[in-house]
Amino acid sequence: MTTGATAAVEAWPHLYRPGDGVAMLALHGTGGSEEDAMALAAAISPHAAIIAPRGRVVEGGMQRWFRRRSEGLFDVADVHARADELAIFLRDAVEHYGIARQVMIATGFSNGANMALALGALHPDTVDRVLAFSGMYPLGDEDVPGPLTTTKVLLLNGSDDPMAPAASVTRLEAQLTGRGAEVDRRTRSGGHGVTSDEVRLAGEWLRALETSHQPKVR
């Protein structure tokens, strides 16, 4: 790795935990932290290598991954720009930490789930799977660009979530499957959040795929 790339990884506040299982990019929700994201990822996969960076957008004193114009109305241009930044960081971090041969899962809650989904859609070469808790469609009216035939996605949502409405999740599912992604959508009763059952389901979903999937060439 070049000195510049190493410096870029070190300059972005993040946590890293080595592991011998899959690798996970863990993204916190609005007002959360890299510690929160690390804890959730570790609960899903105790043996995973985990990279948990901090969102670079601040809204009302809270860290986020991209700007929004109002509740539920995203600044789509900023989603694209921030996904591009995160993809560069992830490529550098994977090389820096020597985990390029491990399957990479982008996971997150709420705003972190939306960024994980945007990353998977816009930069499918960087991640093998996306695991989204209370996420929704993060892009604009345009279709998800490019084929996603090697991407697997698990969507975990509440049926009565005003912050991630079912219609937006349905649109997300249609866009992803229309581009060839393999999507597993699970809906529970309740609203915005992460339940213990969802953490268990996420772990089972990863373990079921772990032995049969090879990482993408990065």
Image (cartoon, rainbow, N blue to C red):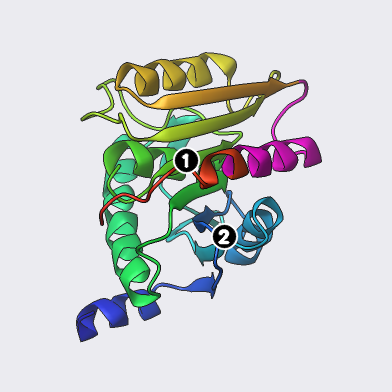
Front residue of 13 and 20: 20
- When the figure is inspected, residue 56 is found, relative to residue 147, above or below; the finding is below
Using the rendered image of the protein, determine whether residue 88 is visible from the camera's viewpoint.
yes
Question: Can you give x and y, in whole percent of width and height, for residue 84 in the image?
Answer: 26, 52
Q: In percent of the image, x 66 and y 59: which residue is there?
A: 42
Q: In percent of the image, x 40 and y 15: which residue is there?
A: 174
- When the figure is inspected, residue 94 is found, relative to residue 120, above or below; the finding is below
Using the rendered image of the protein, determine whether residue 71 is visible from the camera's viewpoint.
no
Residue range in magenta is 189-206
Principal secondary structure, stretch drawn in magenta: helix
Examine the structure image and report whether residue 201 is included in the region drawn in magenta.
Answer: yes
Amino acid tagged 2: Gly
Question: Can you give x and y, in whole percent of width and height, for residue 16 in the image?
Answer: 52, 72
Question: For the residue carrying disc 1, how many other residues have a C-alpha within 10 Å: few (<14), some (14-19), or many (20+)?
Answer: many
Q: Are marks 1 and 2 in contact (CB under 8 Å)?
A: no
Q: Which residue is the site of mark 1?
A: 130
